[in-house]
């Protein structure tokens, strides 16, 4: 996340994420799945622009007419939660400019929510530390705490227990996103139907490869337990995986619960070539991104 404060306006660039590894370790008593996932923030951004307003309310605008522009939007809920937590009497105006496709497994909604928490913390000089923001974030969704940290992290529990890890290299990725939104709860339900909820793969291989800066080993250790559940539920995800795999000549992987798929490449030039081929072969949205490290540098 990249936060800029100028005059009476705070702007937060909210990154997308890719799941470089995701294993489920059984169903928890609270109905969620126990997770071990490695999340990587990447350089595809939504923009949230926040301003103080005297009226005691949240003014909310979203550039995507398909998404809720009020209490149904997670970014609105983040603003509401922070206002109650800090007992703010002033209101806030939030403009959300979307670029990250929704329902894509790229964490856009979660990242926007984390951006609003961090942005309002700055705008109203609340001084909440990262731990505090993270515990608020966990109330909004399992992926939101990750975005309070950004960078690369191992996430456990529901996804809310964050251990930042050093990424030894800047990875270049092509993301290919079919024009379909995948509902995450249905993918988890399908995982149970397929009898795949209790896996035993470990994140250590991908973490070791990242620490060593070894792109080839990292690529070989990418894994997502939700992949087959997403592909068998939504055929467009399987088609997207085939398109990007053919464009790259390398196995593409689903991010989170889909619909987006991605490949890890060794250079930006190679990523651009693959992106062009994927764009010619299919009708999905194509993005060339790299590892995002900005939040860490800013802290
Ligand atoms: O936490 P969040 O609201 O983002 O989760 C969306 C849905 O994903 C949950 O309702 C649940 O069905 C599923 N989920 C899960 N286990 C997790 C995270 C999410 O089953 N660790």
Image: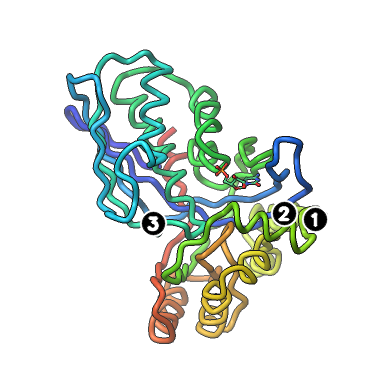
Q: Which mark is residue 199?
A: 1
- Residue 127: name its quadrant: top left
Q: Is residue 126 above or below residue 286?
A: above
Colour scheme employed for the rendering of this structure:
rainbow
Mark carried by residue 259 = none
* Mark 3 within 8 Å of ligand 1, using the beta carbon: no
Give the side of residue 218 with respect to residue 245, left or right: right
Q: Which image quarter holds the C terminus?
A: top left
User: What residue appears at the point 47 percent right and 67 percent down from the top-left corner?
Assistant: 175
Does the CB distance between marks 2 and 1 fall below 8 Å? yes
Q: Position of residue 9 (x, y in %)?
A: 21, 32
Residue 11 in the figure: left or right of residue 139 = left
Instruction: Give the structural element (helix, strand or loop) at label 3.
Output: loop
The disc at residue 100 is: 3
The residue carrying pointer 2 sits among few (fewer than 14), some (14 to 19) or many (20 or more) residues within 10 Å by Cα, namely many
Name the residue at 19% across, 24% down: 53
Image coordinates for residue 261, horizontal then vertical, percent: 53, 68
The residue carrying mark 2 is: 23
Residue at coordinates 36% horizontally, 29% vertically from top-left? 79
């Amino acid at each position: 996340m990249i936060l800029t404060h100028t005059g009476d306006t705070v702007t937060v660039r909210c990154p997308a994420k890719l799941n470089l590894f995701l294993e489920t370790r059984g169903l928890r008593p609270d109905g969620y799945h126990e997770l071990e996932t490695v999340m990587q923030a990447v350089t595809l951004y939504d923009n949230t622009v926040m301003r103080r307003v005297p009226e005691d309310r949240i003014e909310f605008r979203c550039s995507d007419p398909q998404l809720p522009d009020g209490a149904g939007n997670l970014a609105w809920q983040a603003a509401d939660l922070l206002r109650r937590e800090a007992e703010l009497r002033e209101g806030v105006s939030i403009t959300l400019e979307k670029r990250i496709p929704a329902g894509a497994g790229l964490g856009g909604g979660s990242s926007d929510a984390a951006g609003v928490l961090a942005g309002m913390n700055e705008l109203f000089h609340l001084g909440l530390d990262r731990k505090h923001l993270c515990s608020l974030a966990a109330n909004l969704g399992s992926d939101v705490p990750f975005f309070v940290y950004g960078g690369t992290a191992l996430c456990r529990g529901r996804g809310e227990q964050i251990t930042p890890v050093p990424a030894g290299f800047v990875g270049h990725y092509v993301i290919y996103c079919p024009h379909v939104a995948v509902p995450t709860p249905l993918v988890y339900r399908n995982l149970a139907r397929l009898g795949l909820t209790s896996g035993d793969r470990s994140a250590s291989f991908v973490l070791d490869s990242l620490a060593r800066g070894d792109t080839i080993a990292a690529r070989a250790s990418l894994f997502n337990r939700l992949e087959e559940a997403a592909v068998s539920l939504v055929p467009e995800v399987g088609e997207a995986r085939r398109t990007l795999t053919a464009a790259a000549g390398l196995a593409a992987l689903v991010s989170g619960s889909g619909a987006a798929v991605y490949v890890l490449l060794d250079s930006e030039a190679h990523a651009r070539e693959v992106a062009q081929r994927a764009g010619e072969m299919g009708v999905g949205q194509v993005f060339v991104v790299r590892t995002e490290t900005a939040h860490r540098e800013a802290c």
